[in-house]
Amino acid sequence: GNTYYDINTSFLGLNPYFYLFLTIPVNLLLMDTFFYFLHRIAHISILYNNIHNYHHKYRPITSWISRVSHWIDSNIENIAFTMPFVLIPTYFPLMWVLLMFTFYWGCLIHDNKLDLNNKYINCPISHGIHHKYGKDNYNFSYYFTHWDRICGTYKKKKIN
């Protein structure tokens, strides 16, 4: 990986602490980017019907569903969440905090109760819409809604 262990390490000539805090949004945005496009690919018919549907078949969705997926799907998701650390030098303890936050966020967005009422953040209501529509779908993002908005896959409405 591209992790480092000395918190005082400087990159790009930036103050080490400024760089450390800058890597938080950069890593989250990169994770969301990789996740969005890999998730869209997972909804191609052959992949959805044979692999990704395993995650979508459970109703109602709950935080437990966030960890239910085909082993191939899980490994593709792991690529989305670890690739940023290969590309961006990241302080090793921060990498673990971000990975734990990612795990927590996955549980949160599958809870299907909380509406953050923020059009820029993917919330459980938005992700619940994703689970409602199956293969032909909306709201593929993990953290934010910008890729869904840019690519025309954003849908915001309450589900019953």
Image (cartoon, rainbow, N blue to C red):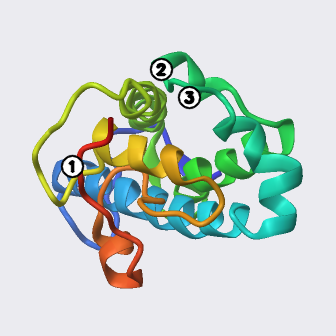
Label 1: which residue? 21
Q: Residues within 10 Å of mark 3 (few under 14, many from 20)?
A: some
- The reply to whether residue 2 is in sight is no
Where does the image place residue 114, in percent across and percent down from the top left?
A: 22, 28
Please name whichever residue, 2 or 38, is drawn nearer the observer in this view of the structure. 38
Q: Amino acid at mark 3?
A: Ser
| Residue extending farthest top | 64
Q: Earlier in the sequence, mark 1 or mark 3?
A: 1
Q: Which mark is residue 62?
A: 2
Helix, strand or loop under label 3: helix
Q: Residue at x 48, y 34 (%)?
A: 99
In the depicted structure, whether residue 41 falls above or below residue 10: below
Q: Residues within 10 Å of mark 2 (few under 14, many from 20)?
A: some
Q: Nearer the viewer, mark 1 or mark 3?
A: 3
Helix, strand or loop under label 1: helix
Label 3: which residue? 66
Where does the image place residue 83, in percent across and percent down from the top left?
A: 61, 58
Q: Residue at x 18, y 60 (%)?
A: 120
In which quarter of the view is residue 32 placed? bottom left
- The reply to whether residue 73 is in sight is yes
